[in-house]
Amino acid sequence: MKLIVIAALALVAVVVAAPAEQPAKVVNILRSEHDLQPDGAYHYNFETEDGTSRNENGELKVVNDAENKPQQVLTVRGSYSYVDPEGHSHSVTYVADETGFHAESNDLSKTQS
């Protein structure tokens, strides 16, 4: 019986000692713009007070498929950036088109150990 009481008290101590969950910080939007065209082209961007931003453009273009038939594809170009918890800035630029998704960033070229 003593063992059960000691185990229960130990469990209570662990739960009480656990760090309390911090409420999520509200991040204000500083700028937000969007524009959608009737032909499917679009542009949007936003920026928040914590250093996060994104800018993207999409447009339809005609390319020939494997059978040399014209096909409409959406080409997307954009970038995003953010500041990590340690205060380092990170940015990525990308293109998505008929050849796939292609991203470039100094962070992507770093080797992780």
Image (spheres, rainbow, N blue to C red):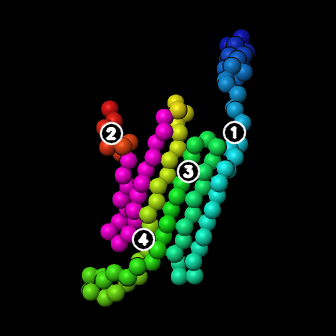
- Find the magenta span and give its range: 88-105
Residue 50 in view here:
yes
Height in image: 16 above or below 31?
Answer: above
Q: Nearer the viewer, residue 25 or 76?
A: 76
Location of mark 3 (residue): 53
Q: Secondary structure at mark 1?
A: loop
**Cα gap from disc 4 to disc 3, whole angstroms:** 20 Å
Q: Earlier in the sequence, mark 1 or mark 4?
A: 1
- Of badges 3 and 2, nearer the viewer stands 3
- Residue shown at 34%/36% (left/top)? 112
The quadrant in which the C terminus is found is top left
| Of labels 1 and 4, the one closer to you | 4
Residue at the (49%, 66%) spot, across then down? 57
Does 104 appear in magenta? yes
What's the distance in space between the residues labelled 1 and 3, CA to CA? 17 Å
Q: Residue 34 location, x and y as percent?
A: 61, 66
What residue is disc 1 on?
Answer: 25
Mark 3 vs 2, N-terminal side: 3
* Residue 69: image location, x then y, percent: 31, 88
Whichever of labels 1 and 2 marks the residue nearer the N terminus, that label is 1
Q: How far, Cα to Cα, is label 1 from label 2? A: 30 Å
Q: Amino acid at mark 3?
A: Ser
